[in-house]
Amino acid sequence: MNQYRYPIISQNPPVAEVTSISYPTISPIAVIGTDSMIIGDITIADDVFVGFKNLLRADSGYPYYVGPRTNIQDYVLMHVHPGREHVEVNGNKWGVYLEGENSVLHHAAVHGPLFIGHNTFVGQHANIYDAIIGRNCVIMHGATVTNGVKIGDDRFVAPGQSIWKQEDADQLPEVPEKHKNLNQEIVDHYYRLGKSYYQNTPLAFSYE
């Protein structure tokens, strides 16, 4: 008997805000860790690694997209404000949209309506709720980004910093030189780590 708990991949229950029932769409070359839950209309793209004890719950609004080679580490919460709020990408409406090669570290909350651009890093215990964040950004550990702010490309949010006014978002500095390769190093590590978990342990699964 397998002593490990499988990921829970489930349809959403219908409610007034989301009357249709949808099942996640998961790439056959994505890797999902034990004890994670993925619920509702969520697209998981190629080579994504979803680690352990994460909750991705699309049951209250528009669907989610997790782009290629993204890593969702452990104890991450992904949800969306109930109802009609969304971000728009290529003419489609999304509750949460991660463009790809993103890192979302342990215990972070990424709550829609939300867009996170390619190659952006979200640190441990970061709290993001209602924002548009550009490409190649670094959002450090314990930071808060909220209230509909828009952060441009290549911007840096310091540890513990709170960004909830657009004027503060507009004044953010560029990513410091020492952090410019931070995200790509983590993306590469978790790409390899996820494949190794799948090939060498009973702790991660793909949906081929």
Image (tube, helix red, strand yellow):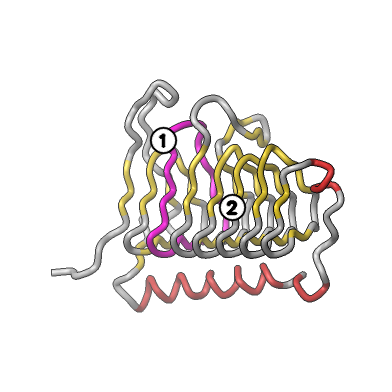
Q: Residue at x 74, y 59 (%)?
A: 157
Residue occupying the far bottom of the picture: 200
Residue 52: say if magenta: yes
Where residue 44 sits: x, y (%)?
A: 48, 50
Q: Secondary structure at mark 1?
A: loop
Q: Can you say which quadrant of the picture contains the N terminus?
A: bottom left
Where is residue 115, by image quadrant? top right
Q: Amino acid at mark 2?
A: Asn
- What count of labels does the image hold? 2
Where residue 152 sits: x, y (%)?
A: 80, 49
Up the image or down, 39 lies above or below 181; here it is above
Mark sitting on residue 59: 1
Q: Amino acid at mark 1?
A: Asp
Q: Residue at x 57, y 35 (%)?
A: 94
Q: Can you say which quadrant of the picture contains the C terminus?
A: bottom left
Residue beneath disc 2:
127
Of residues 148 and 15, the one drawn nearer to the viewer in this rendering: 148
Earlier-in-chain disc, 1 versus 2? 1
Q: Is residue 88 visible?
A: yes
Q: Secondary structure at mark 2?
A: strand
Residue extent of the magenta highlight: 47-68
Q: Nearer the viewer, mark 1 or mark 2?
A: 2
Packing grade of label 1 (10 A; few <14, some 14-19, many >=20) is many
Up the image or down, 36 lies above or below 200; here it is above
Residue 29: say if magenta: no
Packing grade of label 2 (10 A; few <14, some 14-19, many >=20) is many
Q: Is residue 31 left or right of residue 109?
A: left
Q: Residue at x 44, y 48 (%)?
A: 56
Where residue 169 sits: x, y (%)?
A: 80, 48
Q: Is residue 133 left or right of residue 203?
A: right
Q: Is residue 208 visible?
A: no
Mark sitting on residue 2: none
